[in-house]
Image (cartoon, rainbow, N blue to C red):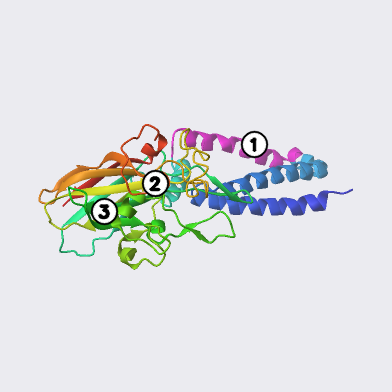
Amino acid sequence: MNLRSPATITLSVAFAVLVITGVLLYAIPFNYFVSSLHIWGAILFLLCIVLHIKNNAKVYKNHLQKPAGKWSMGSAVLGIIPITLGLIFALPPIASVIDFSYNLKKSGEAAHGEYTLIDLSADPASPAMNVFIKAGHEYESAPQPLFLNITYTSVPQIAIWMETLDGKYIDTLYITGKTSNSSYRSKDPAIDLVRRPEALPYWSHKRGIQASDGLYTPAQQQGDLDGIASATPRADYQVKVSAPRMGRYRLMLEVNRSYDFNEFYSATRFPDDPIYSGSGSSGQPSLIYAAEIDSQITGQYLLKLIGRGHHSGADGNLYSDLDQVTSAKQILEFIVATLE
């Protein structure tokens, strides 16, 4: 069987794949699909080259025996030397081509140290408070299976609110979107949305609004939280809010993330609890942080861990025992409030 025609056609297709993916890899940050396609295009190209040389061995040999062929081969081999030296010693224009690619790729990536700013300061005339939330090692969950080998990850739900020094709720300053309207999705395709009273139980009971199903976690279409709700960023972020001058008060933050099971808070720890064991995603309980703020004194206030919520949101108590809580303490590295 003559493989010359199939090899030539396949070679042209492989070359086109290499050109397109090569341009993309030169211009954009690493992409698994493009990189994989480029590698397989190279493998196919090499196989076709072998077949092409095999089928044209005599012609190729004749080219090498001619002066022009010998000169071309020598030039090609020797041409690698200045390219190699240019890359080793970062000499232009050889290194400039690579530097341009590097800078082009970096322009499409977020610079290290950047963070998301969520501006909820509705009244520009009021003093502002910036709450910086530093993501910890456990901020994002491990990939969770969905279907057909598709996975997803979970990020924390967070509420920030104010209360008096004796614990009376004043107002919510910020709430992550899924908690604000109970838009939690279920892995079960037969279930559209699920309620998660265990997510931020301390805050929800402090807020004190009971939904028609008896739960304190906000229901859907909860209009009073619309102006202070936002999707959870994937990394460090800062929330800017209006902070009225009202003497001394306590700034509170509650955080919780799904799938952060440990040895004690395992998936089977509370088999008779329909909330904790019902969806199989509860994990360790929410953690509560606090700082005492003097609204007359500008500066920075570090929020400290003071306790946890109920593991299934059965009540709004603050539990001080944290011995069985492990990795959840690394969801957030630190929280700093800056009063302007």
Q: Nearer the viewer, mark 1 or mark 3?
A: 3
Q: Which mark is residue 256?
A: 2
Q: Which mark is residue 131?
A: none
Residue type at mark 1 is: Gly
Residue matched to label 1: 74
Q: Is residue 208 left or right of residue 271?
A: left
Image vertical order of residue 4 relative to residue 222, above or below: above
Which callout, 1 or 3, points at the residue further toward the start of the chain?
A: 1
Q: Is residue 52 left or right of residue 27?
A: right
Main SS, magenta residues: helix
Q: Secondary structure at mark 1?
A: helix
Residue type at mark 3 is: Trp
Which callout, 3 or 2, points at the residue further toward the start of the chain?
A: 3
Q: Residues within 10 Å of mark 2 (few under 14, many from 20)?
A: many
Inspect this view and state whether residue 236 appears.
Answer: no
Q: CA distance from mark 1 to mark 2?
A: 66 Å
Residue 67 vs residue 277, the one in the foreground: 277
Q: Which x, y percent locates residue 28?
A: 49, 51
Residue matched to label 3: 161
Give the residues in magenta.
64-91
Which picture quadrant has residue 177?
bottom left
Q: Residue at x 51, y 44 (%)?
A: 272
